[in-house]
Structures are given as C-alpha cells and as structure tokens.
Image: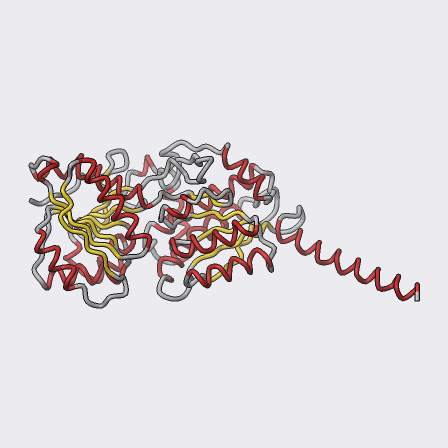
Amino acid sequence: MKKISSMLLIVVMLFLTACGGGSKGSSGSDDGPIKLGALFPLTGDLALLGEESYRGAELAVEEINANGGINGREVELVKGDAVDPDAAQAEANRLINQENIQSIVGSYSSGIAFAASEVAERNGALYWELGAVADNVTDREYQSILRTNPPASMFSVVHINFIKDVVAAELGKDLSDIKVAIAHEDSSYGTTIADEAEKLAEAEGINVVSIQPYSSTSNDLTSVILNIKKADPDVLIVVSYINDAILISRQMKELNVEVPVFIGSGGGHTMTDFADAVGENSEHILNVDFPQYEINKDATPGMEEFLAAYEEKFGSEPRSGHSLANYMGMKVVLEIIEEADGELDPEKLREVAMNYKVEKNTTATGWGVEFDEVSGQNKLSEPYITQWIDGELITVYPEEVAIEKPKITK
C-alpha cells in the first residue's frame, strides 16, 4: 500500500512540475520565447482597422526579433480575435488563464479595450492599449492598464484649439459668432468626443447649435443631415467609423448640404477607403486623428523605416495611421520589457513604465512618452489634423508637424 502511495506521489509531483514548467516558459522563463497576448478584432465589422492595428504591432515585434530579440529571446505574439466586447472577455480569459500570458496588447476598439482590461484587472495581468481612445478605458485608474495613444478627450481639445487658432481668423469671425454642429455615432467613442467638444466649446464662448447622435449601423442618416442643414453651422464636427463616414458624405451631397469647415474625428475619415468611396467629395475635409504619413518627417523619426517595412511585408502602403500608432506603442512595450531584463511580472513592468520617459518628436508618431501614475495614460501623445488635398491626406496642424497650411473656404 505504501509502495502504491509513493508511486502516486511521484506521478503527482511530475505532473505539477510539468505544469509549472509550461507556465513559466510561456510567461517569462529565461529559455523560451517572450509571449505576449495580442487582442484585436481580426474578423467581423471592426476587422479592417483591427487588422491594420495588429499589423503595426507585428512589425515592431519582427523588428526587435531581427535584432536579436530581448536578451537573446524571441518575442511571440499570441493572437486573440476579439470581434466584440463579449469575445474580448472570453479571449482575454483564454490568453491569461490557459496560455499563461501576463501582458496583453490591443485593441483598436474602445468597447473591446474596456471589456478585456476588466479581465486583466481581475486576474492581475497587464493590459497595454495601443489604439482605443475612449477616456473611460483609463479613467477607472486601474493599475493594470497602460495606454500609449491619446484619449478621445484630446481629440476634442484639438478640435477647439483648431477653431480658435485657425478657423476663426480664416472665416473672419469672432469665436462667439462661430456656429458649430456635431454629428456622432453613439458608442462611447463618439459620445466622449462629442460631449467633450461641447463642453470645451462652451468654455470658449463658441456656440454649439446642433448635436446629432446616430447609430453607426444605420443605412439612412437623412434626418441627421437635414437637422445639420437647418442649423446652418460654420463648422461641422463628425465622429464616424468608415461606413457611416461614407454615408454622411454621400447624403450631404444628395441633399445639397455644404458646410464651410468639415472636421472628422478619427475613424473613417482618414482611411483611403473613404476617399476612394466618395471621390472628390473628400476634398478639403479635415480630420483629427493619429499621425498620418504626409507629415514633417523631422518631427517623426523612424516613420520612413516603418513605411519601408510595411510595404515590404504587405505589398502596399498603410491603410491608415492606426498601424503606425500601434507600431510606435508596441515599440514602447518592448523597450520597457527590455529595461525590465525580459521580466513579465506585471508589477515590475508597471514600475519600469513609470520611470520610462521619451521626449516628443523623437518617435515615429512624433509622440513622447510619460505615463500618468494614477491612470496609466501617456500624457505626451496627441492627435494631429490632416486634410484631403488633391487626393492626398496632408498634415496641416499643429505647426511643428504640418507640411501645408489648411485650406478653409468661406
């Protein structure tokens, strides 16, 4: 009986050793790859920019691996397809509890980021957001999340600063005489930007004459367009994904609605698919978004190398600035892991991140890096304004990254 018990004890010990060894190797032992979760919408309605975002992270990983990895170890991205918030929770659970991964990067969509980071918080993992913008992702003040890209409220700051710095003078009007309308899709992304823009405009004495929320899945926005026409604004701020951005532009044309200054807010208006779909209707549309590619290269060192690597791997130019933002963010993640000597312990990495500083205009996006100790938000990232000019998306604001002046028609 004692002999059987001893054999059983040996079997159990061997099993536990095997399990422990597998866990250590996947999360940060010194003899295997450094595995990071990569949670993006790779299929479904959000796949276009989800895949584009993942491409940027992937290129940063390939770059570091080509240079010997981290302490001689390759970095491996373990993908999770987060088509919606429910899938994001399930995939985050799988990556953390089945794949034994302690750090996850993502995710493009704010709803996905919010849901997945909740799972990371409950399980003591670290969630690195490289592209989702809703303020509530970092407003929860979790110690489990670090975000490299700017939040949605910063988009609104740029909207209002642009109206103050450029639009008022170009239109020959005082700020108090400028009328602003806002149309936005009604998720947290669109609502956050719209609410913040309204608040900032009111503080500056700018008159917001109409706010039009709508569903991004709508196939008819006639009522929204007609309400904008009735308000007769000088400036229209629109927050859209790709399909609703195209629909608004087409229906404004059909209903003969013209606004002197049209400013998009990320999402669809910076994509080449938008310009291809609406043709000349895209001309002179402005957009507040992540850095794009017609920009002052002196302020964005490393961008040329990114573009060359992207075209070599994917056979085309980038489809949006999301890949660039994720590339820059992923490089930050990898450099912090490198400074931590390849350790993946979440508390250790956060401690290193809090001491990690990068000056503005020294990265491929032009962003600097300094994480807020309470929220984990990068305080030195900001959106820029681009404009469709002769079929090209040109950076026009702020001055340090602009290559042309914005074209405002009265």
The quarter of the picture where residue 214 lies is bottom left
Given residues 404 and 208, the one toward you in this image is: 208
Chosen colour scheme: secondary structure
Given residues 197 and 326, the one toward you in this image is: 197
Q: Is residue 268 above or below residue 137?
A: below
Given residues 243 and 112, the one toward you in this image is: 112
33 vs 302, left or right, is right
Q: Is residue 371 above or below residue 249?
A: above
Percent of width and height locating residue 27: 62, 50
Number of on-image labels: 0
Q: Work out which quarter of the rendered image holds the N terminus and state it.
A: bottom right
Q: Work out which quarter of the rendered image holds the C terminus and state it.
A: top left
Residue at the outermost right position: 2
Tell me what residue is drawn at x 42 percent, y 56 percent: 112
Percent of width and height locating residue 233: 10, 48
The quarter of the picture where residue 204 lies is top left
340 vs 224, left or right, is right
Percent of width and height locating residue 201: 20, 40
Given residues 342 and 122, the one toward you in this image is: 122
Percent of width and height locating residue 363: 39, 38
